[in-house]
């Protein structure tokens, strides 16, 4: 996957959330596809760090929350284990939120795209990979599992 394809995938995700249409079923199918593409894209990014990077402006989570709820009104809460690799058969069940996952992914990818447009491609790609490994990737994976279970209900 080329860096241009990665850029376009991020852009498609952000457009879906910020400018999508009112067809929830279509939005949800597209969301599922783009999440797969984002997870795949991470495998094509190195770890080159650009030390000249600048700080990106922060998104307003409440605004994004309203957008996500509007795009995906049937998505809600889900169960997940408190720990995936420890306390086998003893982990507690905690509550996840599909909307929160979408908002967190959106915030992180908006920053990546801003860096791409205002800093440098290496800076953006480094934050793309780092964010996947440390934050938005777990939201993506939880959301993928939730959508996999719910896709026939939406």
Image (tube, rainbow, N blue to C red):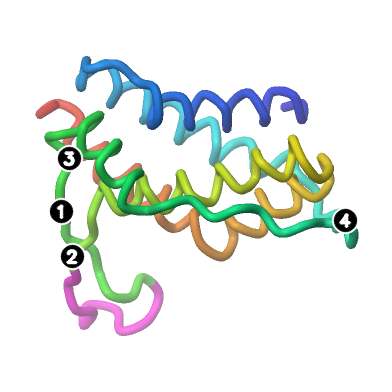
What's the residue at 81%, 45% (across, down)? 119
Circle 1 SS class: strand
- Labels 4 and 2 touching (C-beta < 8 A): no
Percent of width and height locating residue 67: 29, 36
| Residues at marks 3 and 1, CA–CA distance in whole angstroms | 7 Å
Neighbor class of circle 4 (other Cα within 10 Å; few <14, some 14-19, many 20+) is: some
Whether label 4 touches label 1, CB < 8 Å: no
Label whose residue precedes the other's in the sequence (3 or 2): 3
Instruction: Residue at 15%, 53% (x, y): give it.
Output: 77
**Circle number at residue 10:** none
Q: Which numbered disc flags the more N-terminal residue, 4 or 2?
A: 4
Q: Which quarter of the figure is the N terminus placed in?
A: top right
Q: Is 88 rendered above or below residue 96?
A: below
Inter-mark Cα distance, 2 to 1? 6 Å
Viewer-proximal residue, 29 or 112?
Answer: 112
Residue count near mark 2 (Cα–Cα under 10 Å), binned few <14, some 14–19, many ≥20: few
Q: Which residues lie in the magenta part?
A: 85-94
């Amino acid at each position: 996957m080329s860096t241009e394809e990665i850029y376009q995938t991020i852009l498609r995700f952000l457009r879906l959330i910020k400018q999508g249409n009112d067809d929830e079923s279509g939005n949800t199918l597209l969301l599922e596809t783009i999440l797969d593409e984002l997870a795949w894209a991470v495998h094509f990014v190195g770890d080159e760090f650009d030390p000249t990077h600048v700080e990106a402006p922060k998104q307003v989570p409440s605004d994004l929350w309203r957008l996500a709820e509007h795009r995906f009104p049937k998505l809600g809460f889900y169960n997940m284990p408190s720990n995936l690799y420890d306390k086998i058969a003893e982990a507690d069940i905690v509550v996840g939120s599909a909307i929160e996952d979408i908002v967190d992914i959106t915030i992180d990818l908006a920053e990546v795209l801003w860096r791409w447009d205002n800093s440098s491609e290496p800076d953006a790609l480094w934050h793309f990979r780092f964010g996947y490994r440390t934050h938005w990737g777990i939201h993506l994976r939880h959301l993928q599992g939730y959508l996999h279970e719910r896709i026939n209900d939406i």
